[in-house]
């Protein structure tokens, strides 16, 4: 059964598509989860997020007292995500979305009252302060400490790969509040103002030419006791729940993959400079057909996960499998599109002879991010092996 093929869902899809055609702002199309490049773009994005909350396309799953509808429909969520991707707009699952998820599930009533309204009206955005330079995908190896002091905590440490940190008002921080406990139990989650004294943000210039990530250094950053998010030493649960939401958003990119395939067919259908088209080659046609098949498999996995979610029968492996399939397929498509351009693949956006405005160059340079963000592919394979296939756990030193 195709969950998204019923009449009500298709009517909702037409409604969303019409709304986006009428109201979507002019935001540059870029690969992946990207930060604003100017203050004006940041302003436009905040206003757009507020509008999506206003019409109910974001935050429908929130409790009614905080602006939700009380009638969350995961099928509608999937449709909205697909149509946003089809329109070339930034993904809806970002760090502000994940912070809201954590606040609703683990925050105090005072925290919800303070932060949820400003997330809905677009006036405040968030970043995640999870990853560290020496920890890689082993999040539990973090060294940043939040030492308890009278009335709060002093935070010392370094975070890296923090998306949108230069534009964020608050950080969703993980730090060790008890170094005597084991790797997972000694971690707590906190809310940190990004303008706090002792906190320094250093943007990272990436291979894409943009600064979507930052390093964040914290030296004796004082945060108050009411900045604790969830129970003390229970930050691992807060983190895993929010990362599950992130991986779900990454794994549901079927519409984006289909859009990329259409671009690739267009690329293959043009003269490569020798009087021939790549599409004239049987090998190229077979590879494109293979991508179309893999995209359909990705979409069916999304449908399968959604079906289980609707029945309350989710499996621990559903999200990792979806995330792994999407990210690896996206990378393979970007690499192949570059090969179709031959020597022209070394051109970039702004070069007069670059194909399709340099879209594939941007996709190629960003593609490996998807295989790391929200958990590296190697970590996803371990989760699938251990939780879905019942294989022995990997030996850890």
Image (cartoon, grey):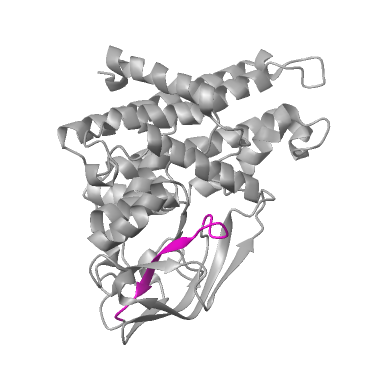
Which quarter of the figure is the N terminus placed in? top left
Residue 338, x across and y down, in percent: 67, 34
Q: Quadrant of the C terminus?
A: bottom left
Over which residues does the magenta segment extend? Answer: 163-178
Question: Where is 15 relative to 96, above or below?
Answer: above
Give the residue drawn at x 45%, y 62%.
170
Provide residue 125's location: percent of width, then percent of height.
47, 54
Number of numbered discs visible in the structure rendering: 0
- Residue 342: image quadrant is top right
Q: Which residue is depicted at the point 26% across and 52% down? A: 386
Question: Quick one: 342 or 189, which is closer to the camera?
Answer: 189
Indicate yes or no whether the magenta region holds residue 27: no
Relative to 130, does residue 263 appear above or below in the rendering?
A: above
Depth check, front residue: 39 or 144: 39
Where is residue 294? Give x, y as percent.
Answer: 44, 27
Q: Nearer the viewer, residue 282 or 39?
A: 39
Identified at 52% across, 38% down, the residue is 90
Residue 214 vertical position relative to residue 361 in the rendered view, above or below: below
Q: Is residue 6 visible?
A: no
Taking the spot 61% from the left edge, 19% from the top edge, the residue there is 265
| Residue 101 in the image, given as x and y percentages of width and height | 32, 50
């Amino acid at each position: 059964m195709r969950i998204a093929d019923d009449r009500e869902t298709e009517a909702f899809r037409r409604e969303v598509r019409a709304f986006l055609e009428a109201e979507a702002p002019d935001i540059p199309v870029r690969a992946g989860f990207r930060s604003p490049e100017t203050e004006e773009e940041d302003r436009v994005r905040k206003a757009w997020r507020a509008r999506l909350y206003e019409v109910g396309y974001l935050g429908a799953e929130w409790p009614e007292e905080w602006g939700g509808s009380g009638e969350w429909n995961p099928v509608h969520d999937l449709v909205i995500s697909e149509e946003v991707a089809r329109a070339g707009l930034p993904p809806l699952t970002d760090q502000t979305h994940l912070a809201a998820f954590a606040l609703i599930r683990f925050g105090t009533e005072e925290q919800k009252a303070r932060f949820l309204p400003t997330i809905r009206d677009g006036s405040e955005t968030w970043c995640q302060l999870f990853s560290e330079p020496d920890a890689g995908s082993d999040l539990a190896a973090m060294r940043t400490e939040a030492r308890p002091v009278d009335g709060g905590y002093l935070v010392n440490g370094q975070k890296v790969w923090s998306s949108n940190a230069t534009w964020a008002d608050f950080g969703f921080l993980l730090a060790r509040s008890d170094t005597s406990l084991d790797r997972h139990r000694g971690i707590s989650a906190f809310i940190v103002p990004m303008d706090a004294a002792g906190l320094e943000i250093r943007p990272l210039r990436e291979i894409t030419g943009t600064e979507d990530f930052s390093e964040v250094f914290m030296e004796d950053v004082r945060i108050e006791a009411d900045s604790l998010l969830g129970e003390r030493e229970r930050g691992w649960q807060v983190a895993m729940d929010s990362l599950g939401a992130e991986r779900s958003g990454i794994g549901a990119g079927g519409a984006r993959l289909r859009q990329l395939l259409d671009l690739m067919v267009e690329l293959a259908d043009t003269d490569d400079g020798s009087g021939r088209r790549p599409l004239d080659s049987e090998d190229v046609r077979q590879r494109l057909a293979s991508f179309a098949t893999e995209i359909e498999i990705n979409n069916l996995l999304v449908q399968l996960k959604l079906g289980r979610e609707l029945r309350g029968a989710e499996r621990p492996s559903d999200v990792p499998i979806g995330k792994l399939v999407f990210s690896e397929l996206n990378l393979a498509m970007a690499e192949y599109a570059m090969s179709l351009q031959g020597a022209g693949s070394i051109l970039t956006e702004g070069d007069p002879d670059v194909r399709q405005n340099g879209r594939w160059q941007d996709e190629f340079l960003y593609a490996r991010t998807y295989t790391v963000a929200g958990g590296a592919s190697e970590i996803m394979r371990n989760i699938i092996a251990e939780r879905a296939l019942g294989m022995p756990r990997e030996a850890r030193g």
